[in-house]
Amino acid sequence: MKSGILSFNKGLFMQHTRSILWICVFFLLSQILLLPLGILIKLLDGQILQYLFEEEPRNILFTISYSIQYLSYIVFPVLSGIILTSYITKKGSSDFVHSLPFKRSTLLYHVYLAGTAALVLPIFINVVILLIIRPFVKPITYSAFQLFEWAGVSLFVVLFMFFVTVMIGLFIGPPLLKGIMVYGILMLPAGLLMMTLANARYFIDGLAAETYTSKIMADGFFLFRAGGYETRPFSGMEWGAYLAIAAVVVAVSFYVYKVRPAEAGDETIVFPFFRWAFIFVFTYVSMLIGGEYFGQFLSGSTAWMIAGYVIGALAGYTLLQMIVQRSLRLIWPLKGFAVYVLLLLLMLIPGTFIATSYEKAIPEANEIEKVYIGETAEPFENVFNGEGSAKFKKVDAGFMKGANSIAEVRDIHSKLIDRGKEKDYDSHTVTITYELKDGNRIQRQYNVPFEELVKITEPIRKNVEFIKASNPVFSIADPENITYISGYDGTTGIQLANVAEKKTITALMSALEKDALTREADMFSPYYYNSSTLEIWLGKQGMTFVSANVSLDDEQSIRAIRDYIPGAESFASVKNVEKAFVVTAKTEEQKEELIDFVFNEEGEEPEWEDMPIPFKEIKGEGEIAELLNPAGLTEESSRLLVLKWKYSGGVSFTVNGLKK
């Protein structure tokens, strides 16, 4: 006996197929143009071919043109789904189709069958073409496994988009709204969470919103995640989750079609429950946008943010009612908005208790495996951020395991909690991350005025473990990965010669490490008067580099630069000094006044005779050389050495403390 669902009717299948035949043809043409033809075009361009091989792609079929192919994967299936479900929204077509001697499950089965056939066939033909041309496109090579991996991913993305579109098409009437909602529903869960976190950071002290949103952006959006398959394939768990979602989508669509009222063809959204869910969810979105606009873009106070929430909610609710009612002559359901406000208040009550607990939480020292404190969400994320660059970084780079370091970070965390949440537009970001012994992870992020942060972090800046954890020079996994070191003399504006000899690299790295350990950490330090940089380039392709600051008091580094880098014999020497002054600044206010005077907003040389605090100009070359000796310079002192350098194409100044 034939199944009522799987009964095949040729006439019904052909009717559906004819309606989307043009999509099948254009989809096939796009696939042939983008991949087989794309391979042939790249074969004719030696430069592009060389670049492809230098990248060492995992699967070259994804490298050729996957990003453009992907656009076709998320457009053609949606068009197919909209067209194949359009008969439901037209009263005449709906009455005719539903009068046929078929169960609704059979009708929907043929929709799925016709759409699947039209979308699978172009990919299958492409596979055949790629198999045929494989022996003739060398040196471009791909295995049968790589070909079937490409085909499998392509089929999955295409069918997933089609299944979601068909399900949405059973809930929503207007074709344009169907298309918008397909992409919207795939973006909504993660987007809603991101927007909630973005707004919650104004009210929850320490909320690591940046980290959470980055994670959601990387993994939470199917459209983005599938688009990035080329560089980051799905994990087994992701495959399982997406396949389960696809199965649920198909199952739900059969149930929805079974209970869908036939007379609901002219409704914007068929089921009343989902109609109100649609209104409430997007009213919430509009409310968050309003609050974010007033809080972030207009830099408004808390009162203005609340006003933004009210305005956003009212505007969103009104617009959504117009869409649902399909009329500008709006009947404004006040009760519905009252229900929305009530639901919001009910969510805020437990949310307040959770937020308070979140703000006060500091793990016990005996629970902590390692800890990180820094200016970025993850250690050195701005350094090792290129493709394949993570392999050059030590596994636990940036983290500290010492009991003293853990205690100091917990003390800083406690002080940040006690200071409360204050809105300060001139603030500095500090992130604290605890990796616990049970495998859990606790992360907090604060925005603190820099002067206050300097005082809070003063003890840890002298901690040797923190000096190493915060300095990227100590984060390099294997010095053998260093290909060369380039330098820049910030005092004169001259680029130093590149050096690649292993002996030279070892000497420079050793000097940088020794100097770093003789002073407090640069991170969270008010002493930012570094004059030059060395860039440590890693890997054969030279796409990743670690930047190391070199200050005038870095005795070992300056000596190594002069000894090992050709043409740098006069680096940071008196030969490059144009003017020198010794200034006495007895208070922090006087130091700030001096810094503002020297490094003025105009970026021009100041009138030295107008220096706001007592000074003495030094003119003797021997005396300047003695003052410029790195052994006599320090970070903190009341006596300061102000230098104007012979800078190529502009002006350059430095300010350093004098030990005597």
Image (cartoon, helix red, strand yellow):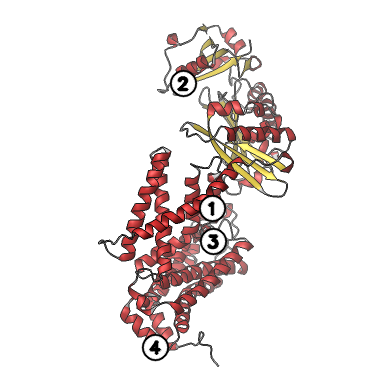
* In the image: residue 293, left or right of residue 202: left
* Neighbour tally class for label 3: few under 14, some 14-19, many 20 plus, Cα within 10 Å: some
Which residue is disc 2 drawn over? 599
Task: Answer above or below: position of 338 versus 17.
Answer: above
The furthest residue to the bottom: 1
Which residue is disc 1 drawn over? 216
Is residue 206 or residue 512 the one in the foreground?
206
Which residue is disc 3 drawn over? 62
Q: Earlier in the sequence, mark 4 or mark 3?
A: 3
* Neighbour tally class for label 2: few under 14, some 14-19, many 20 plus, Cα within 10 Å: some
Task: Give the percent coordinates (x, y) of residue 80.
Answer: 41, 72
Is label 2 in a helix, a strand or a loop? loop
Instruction: Locate residue 318: give its quadrant.
Output: bottom left
Residue under the point 63% across and 46% down: 390
Q: Of discs 4 and 2, which sits in the foreground? A: 4
Cβ–Cβ below 8 Å for labels 3 and 2? no
Q: Mark 1 and mark 2: span between their CA atoms? A: 41 Å
* In the image: residue 79, left or right of residue 8: left
Residue under the point 47% across and 31% down: 426
Q: Which amino acid type is marked by label 4?
A: Leu
Q: Earlier in the sequence, mark 4 or mark 2?
A: 4
Task: Answer above or below: position of 176 versus 497.
Answer: below
Task: Give the percent coordinates (x, y) of residue 571.
Answer: 59, 21
Is label 1 in a helix, a strand or a loop? helix
Which residue is disc 4 drawn over? 100
